[in-house]
Amino acid sequence: MTIRWLLSDLLGRVPYSAVMGPTDVVVTGITCDSREVAKGDIFAALKGLKADGRDFVPEALAKGARVILSHAEPLDALPEGVSWVVCPRDREAFSAACSALFGTEGNPVRLAGITGTNGKTTCAYLLRSIFVQAGGAGMLGTIEYDTGDGLFPAVRTTPEAHFIHRWLRGLAEKGIPYAAMEVSSHSLALARVAHLQFMAAGFTNLTRDHLDFHETMEAYYQTKKGLFDLLDPDGAAVVNLEDPYGVRLSGELHRRKVITVGGKKPADLRPEGLAMDLSGICCTFKTPFGDVPVRSSLTGRFNLENLLVAVGTALATGVSTEHAAAGIAALTGVPGRMERVASGQPFTVLVDYAHTDDALKNLLQTVRELGPERIITVFGCGGDRDRTKRPLMGAVAARLSDILLLTSDNPRTENPEDIARDAEQGIKPELGSGKVYERILDRRAAVRKALEMARAGDVVVVAGKGHERVQLTGTTKREFHDPTVVRELLGEMGWA
Ligand SMILES: Nc1ncnc2c1ncn2[C@@H]1O[C@H](COP(=O)(O)OP(=O)(O)OP(=O)(O)O)[C@@H](O)[C@H]1O
Ligand SMILES: [Mg+2]
């Protein structure tokens, strides 16, 4: 990927208010992270939530940046030969410059985006699986970034604009036809995705979350809605009518093609002949594009909604119903999202990263609906984090489980005993007749105990850490991956 742009040409594409220094310079890259500046790059010194990017200009210049794009004027006198572009709408300008430099206008890759409070990661995995059937895919999301020929651990759900556009350019150069990405509300608010054009955009749901950032539900909703302004003129919005905000959204997207999904009519995509149990979901999706036979290893009410949103989004991106069906069948699970660990044992083990009382409630209710004999839950509360949610989590876990094993979940610098005591305030009042409760602070020992107690037809739920790979105790990081630990313990018990 070679980039060579004359700054004067680039300025035609970027909203700016003033330029200092020469404009006949050649730029060969762009970033907003001073640590990754290479010679010839533009350094975007953005106004951050905490830091001012201008503080990092000396470092960027030392690394060879010769053009600075910033929300305000330089803090110091400009060295000879350095250009400074003042862009009051700095993030939009940065995004526009990234799009121009990486040449991503005109949809070189058919891009699908997913937004909503929950389900983005699951939908992105489903989309990737479907797109792979249809010829190849890239993916950006909470757990990993997929460049089509390599996987990288994700830093954040939706990365900065230069990363996204570099990734898209890379996919285009490799001839990869499709891409799926989770679009977080932060990325919409911070214009990281401002110059993308989506062939399809899916909406899962909206519940109270991230209000520290967005302040009100209305602001949060409006931010999410912004994704649908980024649709290609031929693109479609795919909206979940099972969520009240989805119903609202579907009525507000004027001049857009809208495909609705839900449990029943009038939803455009809906399941027929639904059979759902602990092993998965089986049904036919009736869609405007034709029937899609669904045989999925994902299960639970909300995964049915995720399947509907993902399939609607894939079909709207231009994939065939056959490829959609094959992609659904090929996805055996999503890391840490009701992830099933199966080694031939006669009970079900699910690992999920639900780590709030709400998520835990949702998860355990969903498991209950699938008709298990008993639910055996292993969970803990994080240390150095919101203490008030501990009794709430404890109460929900105790109320909705038959057997509850309280353990540690990243105690950090707190005493695990103290954390457990907070959770027990919520647990104790819920311990009615027949409920079994035990506190086993060593997480591996707690998981082992749960697996030993489980009988045929039971479900063991290991909640809280999901795809995480470490346990943080004190200031030390120890490798700990719930699915791996479960697999090891099942092996020790003779299941292979
Ligand atoms: N459609 C849904 N509705 C409610 N809960 C869901 C839904 N899909 C998944 N979940 C549950 O919510 C949690 C988050 O799911 P997932 O990771 O797919 O969502 P996300 O939107 O990517 O969230 P995040 O922004 O935290 O990455 C998990 O515990 C999962 O089991
Ligand atoms: Mg996610």
Image (cartoon, rainbow, N blue to C red):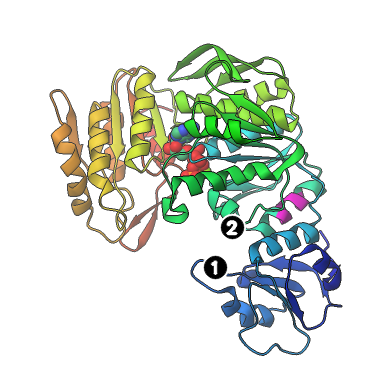
All told, the count of numbered labels is 2
Helix, strand or loop: magenta stretch: helix
Amino acid type of the residue that numbered disc 1 sits on in the rendered structure: Gly
Residue 96 sits in which quadrant? bottom right
Identify the residue under disc 1.
48
Asked if residue 167 is among those painted magenta in the image, a careful observer would answer yes
Camera-nearest residue between 323 and 491 = 323
- Queried whether the magenta region covers residue 372, the answer comes back as no
Is 46 situated above or below 223?
below
Answer left or right for 38 relative to 46: right
**Residue occupying image coordinates x 34% and y 36%:** 360
- The quadrant in which residue 52 appears is bottom right
Q: Is residue 37 visible?
A: no
Q: Position of residue 51 (x, y in %)?
A: 51, 72
The residue at the point 84 percent across, 77 percent down is 25
Q: What x and y, as percent, mark residue 355?
A: 36, 43
User: Which stretch appears magenta?
Assistant: 165-170
Q: Residues within 10 Å of mark 1 (few under 14, many from 20)?
A: few
Mark 1 residue CB less than 8 A from any atom of ligand 1: no
The quadrant in which residue 488 appears is top left
The quadrant the C terminus occupies is top left
Instruction: Give the mark, 2 or 1, whose residue is nearer the N terminus.
Output: 1
Q: Quadrant of the N terminus?
A: bottom right
Identified by mark 2, the residue type is: Leu
State the residue at coordinates (67%, 44%).
229
Query: The residue tagged with tag 1: helix, strand or loop?
Result: loop
Front residue of 494/403: it is: 403
Q: CA distance from mark 2 to mark 1?
A: 10 Å
Q: Residues within 10 Å of mark 2 (few under 14, many from 20)?
A: some
Q: Which mark is residue 308?
A: none
The image position of residue 187, as x and y in percent, is: 58, 53
Q: Disc 2 marks which residue? A: 190
